[in-house]
């Protein structure tokens, strides 16, 4: 039976994509299965990649149901003897972090090594507590998440509440305890942690986000590196921003200011008929931010618009850029996608690849809160220049 180098189980699609992307960027064969229900079909195709990530789409489920889906994912992957088992969690602890980690721990029989820090995106772990750009998580924008507000307590308290006492390591490395929460305030901390993981890979179930997978990828695949020049041309670009977080709104504003040629479609206002013929299209939920629609309604509306535009432009190759995990999942489900063959990253936190491996169907994804304010502007300017 084929063996996997790395198996990643994530609770949402953009998380699976950005956690796997560092391996693809270093030329490891990498695939993301967009939903647990497609895993058996993907495995049946044979020719497993070096790195396989699975989206359990469990972030917003009840905790018990989320735990069952995570356990099923790990039980499906264990027969392929992954060298590294990785439970991807949200870097701001949204979702069922503890319930899913405990289910993964039971299924794998390994101890937890927990470090969800992504210093490159301003997320650090100090004394077992997440900080975002130096601010405690509860006081940040993410503490007001519309659908899945994160907990305010340190990780050790959250695990202890569910019966598992985990010490916090503040000196780097993994320590001797059976389960560990490891502080990380910079990339050097993550690199030390990655080396500790690789010294005893069968001992640990790594728990973290793209920061830790970046460090692991550098250790496992040090020679390969795919340059940004391999990204397909951006003459035709369709950006769908379903995330309603503050950063995503600022990114959209900078894009619109710098690239006035974009045709803007408001998915929740039924104005599809008013969009222009531009090669650069931007889909956002509404003209003004509101809470009239639930996250699920916005995701469905965004997916409908994306599908309608792609069908209208059948025969033209479009780079599809999806922001927000709910939107990315809804779009891919509506397009009947089973997996994404990853090629790498356009920018930190921006994964890209091909829908079902089709080189005529490129896609980029980004979590709503990732990137700087000018990220979409740079993408739009690259598209305008090439067009």
Image (cartoon, helix red, strand yellow):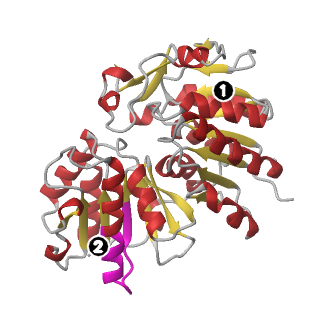
Relative depth, front residue between 115 and 149: 149
Tell me the element at label 2.
Answer: helix
In the image, 106: left or right of 166? right
Coordinates of residue 121 in the picture (x, y in percent): 40, 36
361 within the magenta span: no
Name the quarter where the C terminus is drawn: bottom left
Q: Which mark is residue 68?
A: none
* Residue 155 x/y as whole percent: 53, 19
Instruction: Identify which residue, 147 or 140, lies in the foreground.
Output: 147
Q: Is residue 22 above or below residue 277?
A: above
Q: Is residue 199 left or right of residue 38?
A: right
Residue sticking out furthest to the bottom: 315
Q: Quadrant of residue 32?
A: bottom right
Q: Between disc 2 and disc 1, whose residue precedes?
A: 1
In the rendered view, tell whether residue 61 sits above or below residue 259.
above
- Chain part drawn in magenta: 305-321
* Mark 1: secondary structure: strand
For the residue carrying disc 2, how many other residues have a C-alpha within 10 Å: few (<14), some (14-19), or many (20+)? few
Q: Residue at x 43, y 47 (%)?
A: 348
Please name which of the two marks, 2 or 1, marks the residue nearer to the observer: 1
In the displayed structure, 31 sits above or below 94; it is: below
78 or 358: nearer the viewer: 78
Number of residues whose C-alpha sits closer than 10 Å to that of mark 1, classed few (under 14), some (14–19) or many (20 or more): many
Separation of marks 2 and 1 at Cα, in angstroms: 45 Å
Does residue 371 appear anywhere in the picture?
yes
Question: Could you say which quadrant of the image residue 136 lies in?
Answer: top left
What residue would you read off at disc 1? 113
Q: Is residue 136 visible?
A: no
Q: Which residue carries the number 2 mark?
A: 386
């Amino acid at each position: 039976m084929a063996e996997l180098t790395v198996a990643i189980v994530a609770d949402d699609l953009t998380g699976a994509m950005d956690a796997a992307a560092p391996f693809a960027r270093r030329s490891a064969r990498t695939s993301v299965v967009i939903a647990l229900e497609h895993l058996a079909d993907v495995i049946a195709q044979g020719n497993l990649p070096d790195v396989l990530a699975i989206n359990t789409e469990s972030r917003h489920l009840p905790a018990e149901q989320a735990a069952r889906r995570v356990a099923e994912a790990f039980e499906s992957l264990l027969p392929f003897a992954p060298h590294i088992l990785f439970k991807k969690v949200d870097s701001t602890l949204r979702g069922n972090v503890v319930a899913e980690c405990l289910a993964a721990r039971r299924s794998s029989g390994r101890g937890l090594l927990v470090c969800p820090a992504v210093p490159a995106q301003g997320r650090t772990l100090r004394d077992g507590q997440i900080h975002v750009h130096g601010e405690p998580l509860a006081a940040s924008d993410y503490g007001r998440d519309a659908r899945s507000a994160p907990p305010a307590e340190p990780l050790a308290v959250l695990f202890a509440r569910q019966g598992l006492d985990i010490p916090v390591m503040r000196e780097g490395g993994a320590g001797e305890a059976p389960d560990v929460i490891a502080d990380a305030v910079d990339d050097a901390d993550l690199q030390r942690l990655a080396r500790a993981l690789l010294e005893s890979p069968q001992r640990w179930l790594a728990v973290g986000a793209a920061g830790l997978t970046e460090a692991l990828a550098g250790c496992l695949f040090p020679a390969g590196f795919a340059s940004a020049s391999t990204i397909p041309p951006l003459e035709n670009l369709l950006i769908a921003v379903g995330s309603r977080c503050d950063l995503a709104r600022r990114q959209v504003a900078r894009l619109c200011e710098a690239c006035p040629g974009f045709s803007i479609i408001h998915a929740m206002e039924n104005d599809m008929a008013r969009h222009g013929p531009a090669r650069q299209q931007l889909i956002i939920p509404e003209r003004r931010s509101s809470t009239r629609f639930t996250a699920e309604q916005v995701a469905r509306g965004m997916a409908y618009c994306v599908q309608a535009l792609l069908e209208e432009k059948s025969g033209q190759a479009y780079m599809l850029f999806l922001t927000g995990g709910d939107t990315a999942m809804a779009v891919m489900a509506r397009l009947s996608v089973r997996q994404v063959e990853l090629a790498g990253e356009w920018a930190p936190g921006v994964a890209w690849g091909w829908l079902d491996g089709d080189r005529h169907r490129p896609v980029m994804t980004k979590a709503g809160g990732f990137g700087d304010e000018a990220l979409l502007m740079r993408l739009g300017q690259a598209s305008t220049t090439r067009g």
